[in-house]
Amino acid sequence: MNVLVVGGGGREHALVWKIRQSPLVKRVVCAPGNPGIAEIADVEPIAAEDLPGQLELARRFSADLVVVGPEAPLCDGLTDLLVSAGFRVFGPSKTAAEIEGDKAFARDLCRKERIASPQYWVFDDLRQAESFFEGREEGPLVVKASGLAAGKGVTVAANKKEALAAVRECLVDGRFGDSGARVVLEEKLEGPEVSSIALTDGKTLIPLEPARDHKPVFDGDEGPNTGGMGAISPPRSVPPKILEQIEQSVLLPSIHGMNSASRSFTGFLYAGLMLTAQGPKVLEFNCRMGDPETQPLMMRLKSDLVPLLLGAADGDLASCDAPEWDPRPAVCVVACAPGYPGSYPKGLHIDGIDELETGPDLQVFHAGTGRRGGDLVTAGGRVLSVCALGTDLEDARARAYGALEGIRFEGKHFRTDIGYLG
Ligand code: AMP
Ligand code: GLY
């Protein structure tokens, strides 16, 4: 069969890498893809957000299955457009994708379904927010733009002054455009984080192995949030009892709540959780796989991904075999352009990838890379990630960091503690 994968980041590189290994698949095309993906599949220069362009490509390529990677086209309704044109699509509809695209909606869903989450307040007016702060004791708060903000719309504020400044950035300065026209304020929780991702067709749920990502840009989880600086799977300390609790009291009730709201969810449902002293609580939902969590998860997945994608797209996940996992842990480290997540230069030469001995236990997944002439150059903030399996976390860390050392570009920066924490 022919599979179209929409997107062009590290997540899509890892998905294409895995899908290509399926005996069910004849051809894979990825749009827009990236130079790493171009080495293992066809790529077409059509932006993920170009909905008519993606539909035209699905037709031209006679896609038997379309897998949509990023949140923006899902929230814009790419699945609905393709399904109405007769394509088989893995990914939620526009209204279901609002579980990520509208944080206020996601918080209301948690309240209705009694899913443990922080206390929250929603504002779209600065004056209301100011009077909320006046009546509140001093202390930390989390401020979130309600709409999509590429992982950068969250401020963990140490006090009321910082929180109000973040609210102003959203409501007055328009830092996140329409996405920040509403803000969600949340009680600040404490504890280790876990990314719990499941495949679902809206009826059956198949949880993947747990993962953990690190969003802050600097070691020790310091500095502003990014899309993700690295990920591991499995995280160090998530006992099976907690995973069972997450499935029963977070994932299943959310599927149920989405059905009750006539927004049946198909695709990867991602719950970002904090393991607090009172148990797991939901920080966010995403309507897709995590980036970079996908990279270690795809390296650990031993069985074929494609029957699961087809089963979910066809509403028949109940008849699929459970996935098999490599028990070895995987560590993924992201290398960024200098300045990211602020402004950064592009077009820096990248050397050293071809000299690495890659294989099933070590992969370099491209994200913000491009070609200038024949040369590989940087073309984005998160440039690439190196992902390794190891006998234990220390071994996986050593392999991932060892390989990353051999990849060179000016100002390359990365966290040195991925796999040490949690
Ligand atoms: P989100 O995109 O909502 O997952 O938020 C990004 C990051 O901000 C999370 O991975 C957490 O590290 C942090 N965060 C978000 N919400 C909270 C909260 N209520 N309490 C503490 N930290 C939070
Ligand atoms: N790694 C976090 C995310 O994909 O949203």
Image (spheres, grey):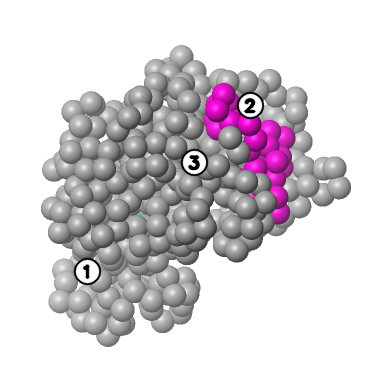
Q: Where is residue 122 in the image (x, y as percent from the top left)?
A: 25, 71
Classify 201 as above or below 150: above
- Earlier sequence position, callout 1 versus callout 3: 1
The foreground one among 158 and 190 is 190
Of the numbered discs 2 and 3, the one sitting upstream in the chain is 3
Task: From the image, tell me which residue sits under label 1.
Answer: 121
Q: Which of 292 and 404 is in front in this view?
A: 292
Q: Name the residue under label 2.
A: 403
37 lies above or below 45: above
Q: What residue type is labelled 2?
A: Ala
Left or right of residue 258: residue 270:
right
Amino acid type, residue under disc 3 in the picture: Pro
Q: Is mark 2 on a helix, strand or loop?
A: helix
Q: Give the range drawn in magenta.
A: 18-45
Asked if residue 340 is positioned above or below residue 130 in the image, the reply reads above
Marks 1 and 3, how far apart in space? 30 Å
Which residue is found at the position 21% from the left and 54% from the top? 257
Tell me the crowding category of disc 3: few under 14, some 14 to 19, or many 20 or more residues within 10 angstroms, Cα based. Answer: many
Position of residue 238 in the picture relative to residue 224 (left or right): left
The percent coordinates of residue 191 (x first, y second) are: 25, 42
Query: Mark 3 = which residue?
Result: 292
Position of the C terminus, as image quadrant, is top left
Q: Which residue is drawn at 29% across and 46% down?
A: 202
For the residues labelled 2 and 1, the Cα–Cα distance comes to 45 Å
Q: Tell which of 214 and 305 is nearer to you.
A: 305
- In-front residue for pair 209/150: 209
